[in-house]
Every structure is written in structure tokens, then in C-alpha cells.
Amino acid sequence: MATIADVVRVIESFAPVEIQENWDNCGLCAGSPDAELTGVLVGFDCTRALIDEAVECGANMVVTHHPLIFHGLKKVDEADPVGDALIRAIRAGVAVYCAHTSADKAPGGVSWAIARRLGLENVSVLDYDAAVSSEGFGCGLGIIGDFPEALSSDRAIEKVKEAFGLPYVRCSRPSDGLIRRVAACGGAGSSLVDRARAAGAQLYLCGDVSYHHFFTPEGFMVMDIGHYESEIDIVSILFSLIQKNFPTFAVRIAQKSNNNPVFYL
């Protein structure tokens, strides 16, 4: 008999909660770890739709990237999206687990998926976290690596758009020189702009770039590929990890609720 705790152990062998950022809320936020597992649904955000889909497919555990409970709750109200999802999960007996910055910082996690999409070589951690790393386990936020060959800024932009299926991207003024050294961080990565530049990156990709970060010096570009777009690959990473370890249980990727909440109209 497998339990919720068994799935938690597998996830945390890849992305331990101990490496999360101190402001984050990774881990099991609803449900009993001792409950018998019936199935797992993996999604990006823990929404009412995700909980409903889990109930429909007979899964009593959902695993997401973004936390359901992120900021402090003073009340649990069905009129609030967070409260509504939490109430539905508890009523249905669905456990809720999230791997947020733990999966951002884990080797092979969110930013490493960006590197794979771009075909980067010589990839390493951009902002190494010595406080939570141990021998043989280096972790941190973001990655830095190289294109196999130097590209013009126009070609680099097209390569990124092709890799992520984007019709367009927000970026700083295109560089006149060639681009080979690339840094990236999934999600809201503006805090690492200076770190990327100091590490020798000629192009830095992330999501949620603010206006003032687009003022860049010659030879360095910043590109915003979107928060959702830069992190969505973690869903398939978590799915593969769980499915591999629980082959006799129904492990599914959410089909109805992995939607980008940002619309471009």
C-alpha cells in the first residue's frame, strides 16, 4: 500500500523542502501523509478546476509547482479562489503538495528545463546556494550556459521564440554583437539580472521583467519569455518522476486546468 507520504518522499528526493527560499511555502499544505494513495494529478497551479479534475479522475493527491497557500490566510472563504480550492480539497479528501522554489533550485529543475529547450551546453548554476548545497548536490537559482554556436541577436530571438512556441517576446534593445553565453531563470527572475551580467551572460531570459530592467548596456540583452512559459516544463518533470516510482498507480498530467492565466488580447 502506497501512501501520500511515499509520494512526498519521492518528490523530496529530487527537490528537498530544505532548499526552498525562506519566504516560500513548499511541501504538503493539505491532507494527511498517512492516507492511502489512490492516484496523483500533476498541475501547475492549484485551482478549483484542478481539484475538480482530481476528483473526476479518482486521484486523492495533487502536486503543483505554485503553492496553494502562499501568503498568510486570515480566513478561508469560498468566495476567494484560494479558499475555494482549499475547501474543495479538504471536503474531497484530496492532499495538496507543491514543489515551488525547491524545484526551482534543484539540479534538473525549472531553469534546467529552459537550458534543454535552448540546447545550451556547459550548463551550471547561475546563483549557487552554498548554504543548502552539500557534496554532490549543488543547487541554486537559474542556470548559465552556451549556445553551440554564436548567434546574432535576431537569430537568438527567433531561436527562443521557436523553442518556447512564442509569437513574440519582450526584450531589451537587440545587441549588435554575437550572442553565445546565455543565462536563464524560470519565473520572476528580475533579481538575477545583475548576477547574469556579472557571470558573463550576453543574454538573460526569465519572466516578469520590470520596465527599468530593459535599460541594458551594449553587449547584454534581457528577454522576458513569460512566467508561465518559463516554468511549465516542471509539470512534466514532476509527472515523470512520480510515474517512474509509482507505475501501478494512476498518475496523470492535468488536462483541463494547466492554463496560462495571462491573456494577450
Image: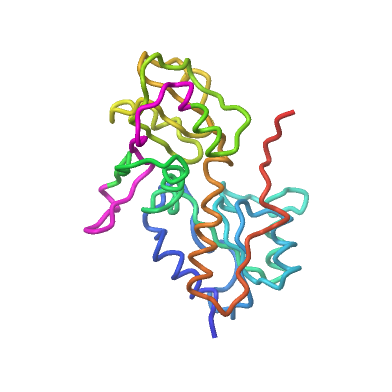
Q: Coloring scheme of the render? A: rainbow
Q: Percent position (x, y) of residue 240?
A: 51, 64
Q: Nearer the viewer, residue 154 or 220?
A: 154
Q: Quarter-wise, where is residue 90 in the image? A: bottom right
Q: What residue range appears in magenta?
A: 130-156
Identify the residue at horizontal 40%, vertical 53% (top origin).
Answer: 108
Q: Percent position (x, y) of residue 36?
A: 59, 81
Q: Nearer the viewer, residue 35 or 157?
A: 157
Identify the residue at horizontal 36%, vertical 13% (top origin).
Answer: 218
From this viewpoint, which residue is outermost toward the left? 135
Q: Nearer the viewer, residue 86 or 1?
A: 1
For residue 164, side relative to residue 133 (left or right): right
For residue 108, side relative to residue 80 (left or right): left
Quadrant holding the C terminus: top right
Quadrant holding the N terminus: bottom right
Q: Percent position (x, y) of residue 152?
A: 42, 21
Specify whether residue 132 is painted magenta: yes
Q: Nearer the viewer, residue 117 or 183?
A: 117
Total number of numbered labels? Answer: 0
Identify the residue at horizontal 56%, vertical 52% (top origin).
Answer: 67
Specify whether residue 124 is painted magenta: no
